[in-house]
Amino acid sequence: MSRSTSATGGITIPEEYQYWLSKESLWGWLFLLPTLAALALISVVPILRGIALSFYEYGGLEEDVFIGLENYARVFALPDFWVVMKNTFVWSFTAVVLMAMVGLGFAILLNRDFKGRSIATTLLLLPWTIPFIAVALNWTLLFNYELGMFNGLLEVFGIQGVAWLGRSRYALFSVTMAYVWRNFPFFMITFLAAMKGIPQDLYEAAKVDGSTRLDLFRHITLPFLQPIGIVTTLLMSLWTLNHFTLVFVMTSGGPGNSSMVLPVYIYRQAFIQNNFGVAAAIAVVMLVIMLGYGMVYLRLYEDEVGGK
Amino acid sequence: MASKTRDTEELFGFEMSPKVVTWAKALGFHAVLWSLVFVVLMPVLWMIVVSLNQVAFDTFIENPGVWLDGASLDAYRRMLYETNFITWFGNSVIVTVSSTVLSIIVCTFGAYSIGRLRFKGRKAVATFLLLTQMFPLILVAVPLFLIFRDIGLFNSLIGLTIAYVAFVLPFSIWMLRGFYENLPEALEEAAMIDGSTRIGAVVRVIVPLSSPAIATTAIFAWIFAWNEFVMALILINDDAKTTLPPGLSSWIGQYSLQWDLLMAGALGATLPLFIILFFLQKYIINGLAEGAVKT
Amino acid sequence: MSRIQFDSVTKRYEADILAVDNFNLDIHDGEFLTLVGPSGSGKSTLLRMLAGLEEITEGEIRIGDTPVNRLPPRKRDIAMVFQNYALYPHLSVRDNMAFGLKRSTDLPAEEINERVREAAELMGIEELLDQKPKHLSGGQRQRVATGRAIVRDPAVFLFDEPLSNLDAKLRKHMRTELQRLQQTFETTTIYVTHDQEEAMTMSDRIAILDTGTLQQVGSPREVYNRPKNTFVAQFIGSPSMNMFVSKLDRSGDRPRFVGDIDLPISERQAESIAARSDADQFLLGVRPEHIHVHETSVEESVRAFVDIIEPLGSNDLLYFELESNIDVTSVIGNSIDIGEDEQGDEEEYKVFIEPESIPQRYENSDDPVYLTFDTEYVHVFDPETGENLSLDQRSTPEAQTESATGAGD
């Protein structure tokens, strides 16, 4: 055993430092350093800057002027703001519920042994790999008044087509459809994985006890899916609240503000109308909502998954 | 899983031999499944159809021959030679590849730290990472624009890459951490007793063992970067420096009636991810499953 | 020289969870020492501190006179076999075994290869060298893990419950094999287990731990025959020692114990017990092989009723109840541990009998049997401290070692 020093790659490290090098706390922070640095630059500093900005009148090239809560007062006085809030919640809620339902349906279909199962899974996963920008272009065409598939199908049944993206009644719903189509596979795969994790002997025991297929589903499958279902739903809700691309490309929030959601609204306030202060204030409101939502998520996560 | 519930085999009121019933049930199942798969894939198929020859849906249904006669790769030719598509595609590749590689390196060590090492503050870091996932991207993007403008990272692919790395880190670390937690700790202890340093143990034992999980993480980083829209829109000003998503979105106004070109562009943007799906599907599915169970 | 010294070693987790409390032990060069104790006794913590996997809160550990507190694991010249073997799944058996030599030595590749081959031969795993661990059976993995340790020829072998994942038969076989290996190499070995039988059969000395404190160190025979306290008495030996509650009565012409069981003792013993403890009642510990069962009443016998007779092969195990007995837990002090035996049924009395020497009809019947005790093997424990009060009075401890054979089976 070498007592005093050891040579590591030609560099001699005194014993005293070798001891420190074996400490887990040192490695812990060392390994985290790049992560924390990146997050500080890209998340923490901007968030703080954003919160600060919400209390200032953005001066562009001039000095910013502190105006206290004025920006927030402006935000809550904007008639658009409440419409956008409502749209955001309607869109998130509808999208998540539909995705969960469609995803669960396909997971049930795929959760059995049959020839071609792996091909079917791959094909059903495919929408999830399409970039949002391509989805946006694709579905803009599908919803097109003259050339689109939906109006084409309606016409086959003799129904007059609709300007899906051009009418305030349908615009948000149309975007939701595109979003659900793109993202339901996420739910499908997570549910499928959860189903695979259910011990088969539970089903066998229940069958021996005389359960019907419906009983098996209600009393074994569903309870087992619940924790993962809740976690996935909450996570997906956060992502949906944040989603920008489809709305921005397909409708830009229009017509009017009928399909406007918070992220696009903030973008417009900042970069089209140059209201950085107001944009920051809205973003802070959104942050508060998402953090509140996140707390619920964490709480449920710990309850359901028993996270550490 | 076809279950026999009754002794007398009956289907829709007809008496049948058990074999026929099994066969009929399987047929019914496959019919339902594959027609649903077809419905789901319709939009993609339509994208391909239109990119080859722009037609209205009803025309195509009534007389596919007309479409076939006019089908050509002309839209793809125009996309490649008459637009900025190749530049954007290249930019997207640069940003995606570099942010994926960087995030894997950073997140391997970060996840190891909070997944495996015991030290004060790691719980706080883990919670903080989870918290950053709740920061709205747009809330970060607005001030980030001002910051990047001040420090000269605005309108640069390097700035965009750094932003992407930081954005996928929390999710990647969270996912990989779950995997690390399940590896037996005795493995790197054995390596350290056998003469490895801490980094040696991570590189020689932990990284090779976690390669499937790292692959999944990489795919997620790749998909994120390839998809990302807002950051690129805000942080890049120059048409020659932008990536595919904001680039293609500008076509909507510019080539609004050239649907064949738009669809060709959409397909071109999709191609790299299709390729990934077909080669690495296993990792995506396992990763989503892992992520769901552990996230 | 690779003796190992634990000098006032203490391990505290977080604020105040005391895992190991002021542990002192010298392990001789070439000795096979077993750390045994129930889960949570601190035995694994001690081993991991020695390996450098846990920090030492207080005290010092020396390997071959070098303090190792501040040395990283790789500098301690040790090899360890883990409970789950910790074979690197992505490496072949050959690379697993060569891993340590490549990291810790500058040996040329041929030399490493040669040593791996030799070690594999010794362990009988040569034909497995190119396999991946996942293709091996539990026993083969165990051999690879052991081979990986011996190939490095370290100063110290550490075993952390290495056999607990094997089935009973294989476990017995591997015991002898590990022992044989250790005798060949004469390498200082520390072996952690919760299985007292394993400890008894393999070790030169056994260190018995409970709740972070060292209870007793000694040869297997010593800890079996001369347990220092109730914990050691109950933990070592299977089935465990019977515990009866009796009062010391010195009013008659001869002192005797009265209570669960009645026993005469010598005046000298009574004197010394009374001198060492002022307790009112005592725990009398008797191993199942030191009780004799009779069908008819004999002198100084105690009436008992048979519960069940379990045939074990070479002898039978008879479970009995007394007419009346005092609950042991009601007399013992709060701080002492009488160490429940593996089945957790410490309130059952057991005795070994010759097969079929007592007819089956006694099971659950009202007909009593009569018990006599080998008084010289009765241990008297202080119920407050758990201390064995009869130890110093045992005149010929060596003579008793003859009867220690029942311990293993």
Image (cartoon, coloured by chain):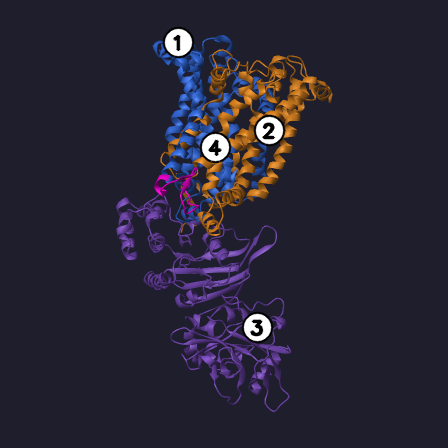
Chain colours: A orange, B blue, C purple
Q: Is residue C165 magenta?
A: no
Instruction: Examine the residues drawn in magenta and state their main secondary structure.
Output: loop
Residue labelled with disc 4: B106
Quadrant housing the N terminus of chain B: top left
Residue A185 placed where, x, y %?
A: 47, 30
Marks 1 and 4, Cα distance to the nearest angstrom? 40 Å
Residue at point 60% right, 20% down? B142
Kind of residue indicated by mark 4: Val
Check residue B19 for magenta coloring.
yes
Residue at position x 33%, y 51% in the image: C136
Residue neighbourhood size for the residue with mark 3, other residues' Cα within 10 Å, grouped as few (<14), some (14–19), many (≥20): many
Q: Say which of marks 2 and 3 sits in front.
A: 2
At label 1, counting other C-alpha atoms closer than 10 Å, the crowd grade (few under 14, some 14-19, many 20 or more) is: some
In the rendering, which numbered label is found on residue C387?
3
- Give the camera-side residue of B26 and C247: B26
The residue that label 2 is drawn on is A93
Instruction: Give the spatial CA distance, label 1 vs label 2.
Output: 41 Å
Q: In the image, B135: left or right of A120?
A: right
Q: Is residue A76 above or below residue C14?
A: above
Q: Position of residue B31 (x, y in %)?
A: 40, 31
Label 4 environment density (alpha carbons within 10 Å; few <14, some 14–19, many ≥20): many
Q: Marks 3/1: CA distance?
A: 95 Å
Q: Which mark is residue C345?
A: none
> Can the viewer see residue B89 in this picture?
yes
In the figure, B163 relative to C321: above or below?
Answer: above
The subunit carrying tag 3 is: C
Bounds of the magenta segment: B1-20
